[in-house]
Image: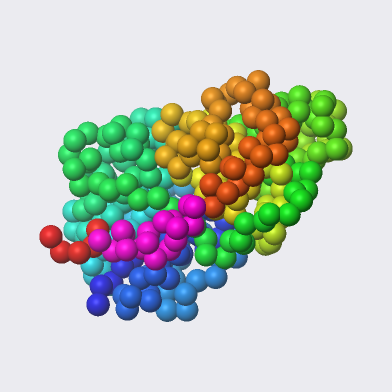
Amino acid sequence: MNKIVFFIGSLGGGGAERVTIQLADYFCNKGCKVYFLAFSKENSNYIVNKNVMVTYLPVSENKIVDVIEKIKFIKKYLLGISPDYVVSLGLGHQYIFLSNTIGKYKYILSERNSPIDFYKHWYEKFFNKYCYERAYKVVFQTTNAQQYYNKKIQEKSKIIFNPINPNILEGYDGLREKRIVFVGRLSPQKNVYLLLDAFREFHKKYGEYVLDIYGQGELEKELIAYCEECKISGWVRFNGLVSDIYEKMVKATMYISSSDYEGMSNSMLEALAMGIPSICTDCPIGGARMVIQNNENGILVPIKNTEKMTEAMLKIVEDEQFAKKLSKNSRKLREYLNVQYIGKQWEGLMKKQ
């Protein structure tokens, strides 16, 4: 029986956390002993398999003390469990490095974002490269992210997509509501300003549509102020985090992802799988181009391009048959992005070689 430790940010909130919880459930059902080492007690809104043993890292207000305490805890924790594998989906690489545990356990590390754009400091890039080179296996979500790293890392890596949440709704074929939905963090990476600018232009022709934004983040107040400045605040709703997100999404006219850089967006995959006509920015290392065939099951537009985004929005509204084609074709993602299929790929990484 394998013992697997997952590093996890919290028990809720983010896409990486949800994927981690889905994988943990898969391995619990396979008879493995699964442990969570969590960095935060906040946002504990995901349901975790009752057999997962959850431990929280210590937290100190002093940043230096906090790092030291976490390093000590990780060393002692892993020594006590003696896991067969340690899995981290883009989290805690600095602690893995500083705790000097990377060579003592079989780490499986996953890149969750664009390695070009996401890591802003030299030391973050150093931690990543160091850990990937010494890891047992590395998982990437896109070919371009994999090719960013050297041959040594590529040879022990595998491309595995995120599983789609099994709780998403079936596709909707009725009359769609005059709503556009965005789901994600309100952070610079997501470039919601691009979406707002495109919606402002779109709204000049189709004033009956509203834009529903689901998510929270550091830019929320700025974005609300920007809507007021653009005189579209009456048609843009900031809804925060909601528990029934799939019910909120499924009948929308379209879903939009406006990111400047991205890994494999969970909300994008779910929107496509539910058959919502979707527009996504074609990020250089992003996952959208891995799953979207342009104008067949979704629309790809260049990053930071308001004009092309607006054109895509107009096309979905003005060409009903085109929108129906996107909806029908995108639902096929369900066939190969279910938890069982993705779980088997992760399980394959753990077989003895």
At horizontal 41% and vertical 33% (from top left) the residue drawn is: 285
Q: Position of residue 296 (x, y in %)?
A: 53, 38
Q: Would residue 204 appear left or right of 316 to someone viewing this image?
A: right
Name the quarter where the C terminus is drawn: bottom left
Q: Is residue 139 above or below residue 305?
A: below
Q: Which one is nearer the viewer's eye here, 324 or 43? A: 324
- Residue 280 can be seen, yes or no: no
State the quadrant of the N terminus.
Answer: bottom left
Q: Residue at x 15, y 64 (%)?
A: 352
Per the rendered image, the range of residues in magenta is 332-348
Where is 103 relative to 318, above or below?
A: below
Residue at 38% of width from left, 35% of height from top? 115
Residue 190, placed above or below residue 91: above
**Residue in front for this viewpoint, 300 or 15:** 300
Whether 340 is among the magenta residues is yes
Q: Quadrant of residue 80?
A: bottom left
